Image: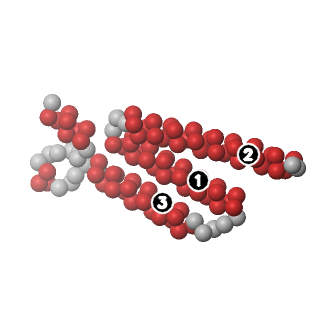
Amino acid sequence: MSAAVAVMAVLVALVLLLLGATLVLAVGRIVRGPTILDRMIGSDMVLTTALLVIAAAMVLRRDVTAVPVLVVIAATSVFATIAVARAVTPSSDPSDEGVDATTPEHAIEEEA
């Protein structure tokens, strides 16, 4: 085995280790919460990590057939983030009778 192959194997293992750590921390953020925004950040990190894993596999295999999968995952992440941002933004509709936000966390606080 040449030195270049050994270095490449070590670098691939290091990248996979770091991506695995990122995935564990992102899932921890989803589980811990406590707000919907914390969970959204965690899910964005999970999707971004999935993108990076697929992209790294594409580079190693020198194959670009998974590009449509990357586009779909990226679009899903963007649209989900926009949906959550719209859900937690205070409403400007006067018929809401002064309700500031539509998140479940605020609804619980207001009832108490």
Q: Is residue 10 shown left or right of residue 15? A: right
The CA distance from mark 2 to mark 3 is: 25 Å
> Which corner quadrant holds the C terminus?
top left
Disc ID at residue 11: 2
Label 3 vs label 1: CA separation? Answer: 11 Å
What label sits on residue 42 in the rendered view?
none
Does 11 sit left or right of 87 as displayed? Answer: right
Q: Residue at x 63, y 68 (%)?
A: 64
Secondary structure under tag 2 reads: helix
Cβ atoms under marks 2 and 1 closer than 8 Å: no
Q: Amino acid at mark 3?
A: Ile
Q: Which residue does the image show at 44% across and 43% down from the upper left?
A: 42
Report the Cα–Cα distance between label 2 and label 1.
Answer: 15 Å
Residue corresponding to mark 1: 52
Q: Is residue 83 above or below residue 65?
A: above
| Quarter of the view holding residue 86 | bottom left
Give the farthest residue toward the front.
1
Q: The disc labelled 1 sits on which kind of residue?
A: Leu
Of the image marks 2 and 1, the number of the one nearer the N terminus: 2
The local secondary structure at tag 1 comes to: helix
Q: Name the residue carrying label 3.
A: 73
Mark 1 surroundings: few (<14), some (14-19) or many (≥20) residues within 10 A: some
* Of callouts 2 and 3, the N-terminal one: 2
Please tell me how crowded label 3 is: few (under 14), some (14-19), or many (20+) other residues with Cα within 10 Å. Answer: some
**Front position in the image: 42 or 85:** 42
At mark 3, the secondary structure is helix
> Horizontally, is 80 left or right of 26 in the view?
left
User: In which image quadrant can residue 39 be found?
Assistant: top left
> How far from the left and from the top, in percent, is residue 104?
24, 42
Residue 14 rendering spot, x and y as whole percentages: 69, 42
**In this rendering, is residue 28 above or below 48?**
above
